[in-house]
Image (spheres, helix red, strand yellow):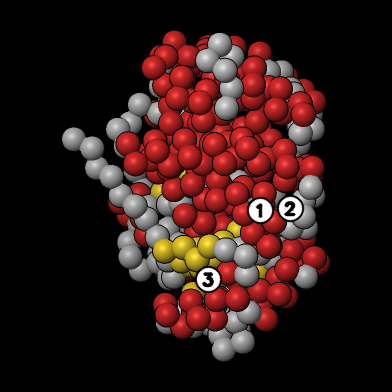
Amino acid sequence: MARIAYLTTIDFDHGAVEKLDEVLAELEAARPLLVTDRGLVESGLAGRVSEAMPKHPPAAVFDATPANPTEQAVCDAAAVYRESGCESIVALGGGSPIDLAKAVALMASHVGPLLQYAVSEGGSERITSAVPPIIAIPTTAGTGSEVGRAALIVMGDGRKLGFISSHLLPRRAICDPDLTLGLPSGLTAATGMDAVAHCIETFLSPAINPPADAIALDGLRRAMANIEIAVGDGGNRDARWQMMMAALQGGLCFQKGLGAVHALSHPLGALRDPVLHHGTLNAVLLPSVLRYNAAAAPEKYEPLRAAMDIASTDDPADAIADLNERIGLPMRLSAMGVPEDVLPAIAEAGMLDHCTQTNPRAPTAAEYATLLHEVY
């Protein structure tokens, strides 16, 4: 029997951020903590969003979100939430501030430590409806975290763990493509490939969820048709709209489950040095994983080719590798500064990641090690 659940309310269009004050009123979300990062403060986007909630101004701002959110940052932000008497959270940024906001909402309403709520600890059932309302406003087009149930947090012991519950789902997502117009081309490429990876891995997952499959294929079509345009012309408002929609669709559909790309990118993203971008990791890993999974889901590769707009004789893995090169992303882990001696530990950690369970082909640690060396 399949259990299928969808999801949250989304305001989507150019200028949608101007609805923020109205949304806060609808949710009765008083005294919000604005969770963001320093780059968005310096760019003026955080100030612009604050101006969009004149009747519900932030009680406090937490702008120390790391590139990959950490347990310590969760604790620090939760302390600001409590000390400032906050009652809700507005999350502004890419996946890192939005994931951090979910974990902050959890720790602001539940007894610690954070670890007991991780999926690996059987913690999802411990997360209750006491979580305060979260309004998520993405400033990148990639993660889909604004409509996702999960937060990925690097713990104090170095593991990157998933915290997944319907109670962590933002109560409202405000998706304004205009907030991505200033995104640099490299970040546009990396976050765009994150959306591509979400759609592909969801579609290939063996879990039964036809609505998710349909959303994944439509999101993939949009991303493949528009990512190069958005990278090449960051001011193209239609391409930015399409990429934000593709990212949203990736987030809507990956409730079905992801796969080996994410199982390996999660522990790689937990490395303290170098600090690695999640979307770039997914882009580098995706071709090798596509080749690995082909024999396990051959009937899915033809609709995958159609959504990618490639010929029936073309290899989707080659098409992704070629796309990565055209949009200027690194082709190998070594080019990202990953030390080779960490690969065995990454392979072992990947086996413990929750995304391994929904990969179409059941891997071994040795096979994961081979995949990593192929892209090293």
The reply to whether dot 1 and dot 2 touch (C-beta < 8 Å) is: yes
- The image quadrant that residue 137 belongs to is bottom right
Which residue is the site of mark 1? 238
- Name the residue: 72% across, 45% down: 230
Say whether residue 52 is left or right of residue 350.
right
Name the element at disc 3.
strand
Which residue is the site of mark 3? 89
Disc count in the image?
3
Amino acid under disc 3:
Ile
Can see residue 99? Answer: yes
Of the pair 297 and 364, the residue shown nearer to us = 297
Of the pair 355 and 8, the residue shown nearer to us = 8
Residue 118 horizontal/vertical position (percent): 43, 46
Which residue is the site of mark 2? 236
Q: Residues within 10 Å of mark 2 (few under 14, many from 20)?
A: some
Which residue lies most toward the bottom here? 55
The reply to whether dot 1 and dot 3 touch (C-beta < 8 Å) is: no
Q: Residues within 10 Å of mark 3 (few under 14, many from 20)?
A: many
Residue 122 horizontal/vertical position (percent): 34, 43
Amino acid under disc 2:
Asn
Say whether residue 147 is left or right of residue 236.
left
Say whether residue 3 is left or right of residue 174.
left
- The image quadrant that residue 210 belongs to is top left
Decide which of tag 3 and tag 2 comes sooner along the chain.
3
Q: Vertical placement of 201 versus 171: above or below? A: above
Can see residue 86? Answer: no
Q: CA distance from mark 1 to mark 2?
A: 6 Å
Say whether residue 104 is left or right of residue 165.
right
Decide which of tag 1 and tag 3 comes sooner along the chain.
3
- Name the residue: 46% across, 63% down: 10
Amino acid under disc 1:
Asp
